[in-house]
Image (cartoon, helix red, strand yellow):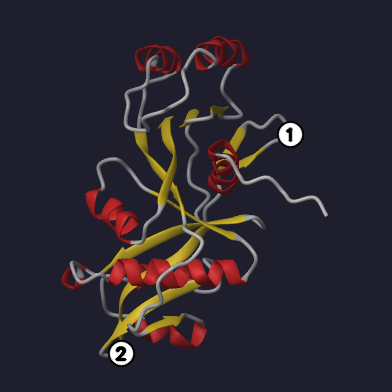
Amino acid sequence: MVTPRPRLARDWLDLHLDALFLHDERRRIVTRNALDRGPAPRFFLGRTPDGNRWRFRDDFPDALASRLEALCKEEPPATDLRAPLQHENGYREFLAGHAPIAETWSGPAYRFPASLPPTALDVVRLTAGDAHLLRGGDLEPWLEDIGHSEPLVALVREDHAVSVCGSVRITPEAHEAGVETSAGARGHGFAAAVVAAWARTVRELGAEPLYSTSWDNAASQAVARKLGLTPYASDYWLA
């Protein structure tokens, strides 16, 4: 029996990219892989210590994409995921020349450790029969995710969900986490508890759990540290 090689950081990035976006046959981004099918960025660049990946939206002009790709090929791998992009000014110049830049995003992407700590907190997997747990609070918008963002788990206090985590982007190989905690329930470790419970459930389904956030989201990065997640890539995109 041939033992499969361990995944490299760029392999995790490939899983992440397929979870983030729907692609056409040219590997161009068509839309975000989310329940609302939100607008896709025109340009995505993911950096890892052992290689980078980039994508363009399907309506981005081929001539501009070719010139931008030449610049991407010169971008060094990220031995420090927080290090600034060497060619960021060039990317922005290309995109702004095509159309005004409406959104910039950057942040780390994480994988989970082989084992996750169990939690004694009251975390439940939400089904249609549990909709009442989400009503009347900050997390009510998650009602539409029941039956779609599977698995969807919640930490419950006094018959109300105070923290939720669900699969907001799904492929057969990987699920990306979406997590939210009620304003009045933050600072108690609830987010880490639901993310850990969600990740264990995703693995039971035979997929890899993935977690990503922005560099500006200190609370989300604190959850990653608490759970011992490993950063494997830095995302950058322009819309």
Name above or below for residue 83 compared with residue 129. above
Report the residue at 56% width, 11% height from top: 70
Report the residue at 36% width, 78% height from top: 119
51 to the left or right of 138: right
Report the residue at 72% width, 49% height from top: 4
17 to the left or right of 156: right
Residue located farthest toward the right when viewing the structure as drawn: 1
Q: Which of 166 and 207 is in front in this view?
A: 207
Q: Which of 122 and 164 is in front in this view?
A: 122
Q: Position of residue 3 (x, y in %)?
A: 74, 51
Distance between the alpha carbons at the discs numbered 1 and 2: 47 Å
Q: Residues within 10 Å of mark 1 (few under 14, many from 20)?
A: few
Name above or below for residue 101 compared with residue 190. above
**Picture quadrant of residue 16:** top right
Residue 25's disc number: 1
Q: Is mark 2 on a helix, strand or loop?
A: loop
Q: Is mark 1 on a helix, strand or loop?
A: loop
Instruction: Please indicate, yes or no, whether residue 239 appears anywhere in the rendered image.
Output: no
What residue does disc 2 label? 159
Residue 101's disc number: none
Instruction: Please indicate, yes or no, whether residue 63 appears anywhere in the rendered image.
Output: yes
Disc 1 marks a residue whose amino acid type is Glu
Q: Position of residue 197 (x, y in %)?
A: 44, 73
Disc 2 marks a residue whose amino acid type is Asp
Q: Where is residue 224 in the image (x, y as percent from the top left)?
A: 34, 55
